C-alpha cells in the first residue's frame, strides 16, 4: 500500500538527514547505502562478501517473525526462535567463498538414485 511504503520505507530514511540539515553529498551517500542495503536483502541471492538475506527472506515466508533488520529486537522479543531452528539460520552467515551455501548447507538430503 502506498501509505505503508511512505511511512515504513521512505520516512525512516529521510527524517534523519532532514532534521540534521545534512549536506547534499551526505544525503546522496545515505540514500545510496539505504537503496543498496534494501536491494541486497530483497534480491534473493546470498552474494559473496555481503550480508546474508536469509533472515529477511524468512520474514517474507513467515510474516509474524524476523521483523528487524539487525535482529536484536527479534532476539529480545523471541520472534526469531523458529528461524533459529531452520537450515536458513545455518546459512545466515557472511559468505567468504564462491560456493553457494545452498549447496554447502542444503535444505534436505537428496535421495541417491
Image (cartoon, rainbow, N blue to C red):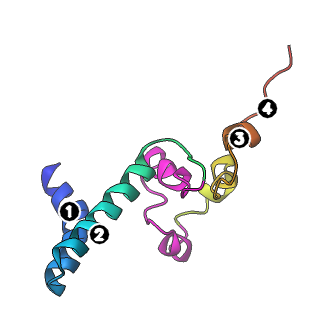
Provide the secondary structure element on which disc 1 rests: helix
Q: Give the mark count.
A: 4
Tell which circle, 2 or 1, labels the residue nearer the N-terminal end. 1
* Residue at numbered disc 2: 30
* Residue at numbered disc 4: 109
Residue 47 vs residue 15: left or right? right
Q: Nearer the viewer, residue 14 or 87?
A: 14
Crowding at label 2, few (<14), some or many (≥20) Cα neighbours within 10 Å? some
Crowding at label 3, few (<14), some or many (≥20) Cα neighbours within 10 Å? few
Residue 43 vs residue 103: left or right? left
Residue 57 vs residue 4: left or right? right
Q: Are marks 2 and 4 in contact (CB under 8 Å)?
A: no
Q: Are marks 3 and 1 in contact (CB under 8 Å)?
A: no
Tell which circle, 3 or 1, labels the residue nearer the N-terminal end. 1
* Residue at numbered disc 3: 99
- Between the C-alphas of marks 1 and 4, the distance is 42 Å
Provide the secondary structure element on which disc 2 rests: helix
From the top left corner, tell me how far across and down residue 65 is, in percent: 48, 58
**Mark 2 or mark 4, whichever is nearer to me:** 2
Span shown in magenta = 49-78
Image disc number at residue 23: none
Residue at 72%, 36% in the rendered image: 103
Q: Are marks 1 and 4 in contact (CB under 8 Å)?
A: no
From the top left corner, tell me how far across and down residue 88 is, in percent: 63, 49
- Between the C-alphas of marks 3 and 4, the distance is 18 Å
Q: Nearer the viewer, residue 8 or 53?
A: 53
Tell which circle, 2 or 4, labels the residue nearer the N-terminal end. 2
Residue at 19%, 70% in the rendered image: 14
From the top left corner, tell me how far across and down residue 37 is, in percent: 40, 58
Q: Are marks 2 and 1 in contact (CB under 8 Å)?
A: no
Amino acid at each position: 500500500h502506498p501509505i505503508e511504503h511512505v511511512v515504513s520505507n521512505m520516512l525512516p530514511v529521510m527524517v534523519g538527514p532532514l532534521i540534521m540539515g545534512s549536506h547534499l553529498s551526505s544525503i546522496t551517500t545515505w540514500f545510496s547505502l539505504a537503496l543498496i542495503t534494501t536491494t541486497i536483502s530483497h534480491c534473493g541471492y546470498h552474494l559473496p562478501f555481503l550480508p546474508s538475506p536469509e533472515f529477511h527472506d524468512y520474514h517474507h515466508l513467515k510474516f509474524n517473525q524476523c521483523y528487524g533488520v539487525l535482529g536484536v529486537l527479534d532476539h529480545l522479543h523471541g520472534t526469531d526462535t523458529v528461524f533459529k531452528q531452520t537450515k536458513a539460520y545455518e546459512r545466515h552467515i557472511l559468505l567468504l567463498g564462491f560456493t553457494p551455501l545452498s549447496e554447502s548447507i542444503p535444505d534436505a538430503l537428496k535421495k541417491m538414485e
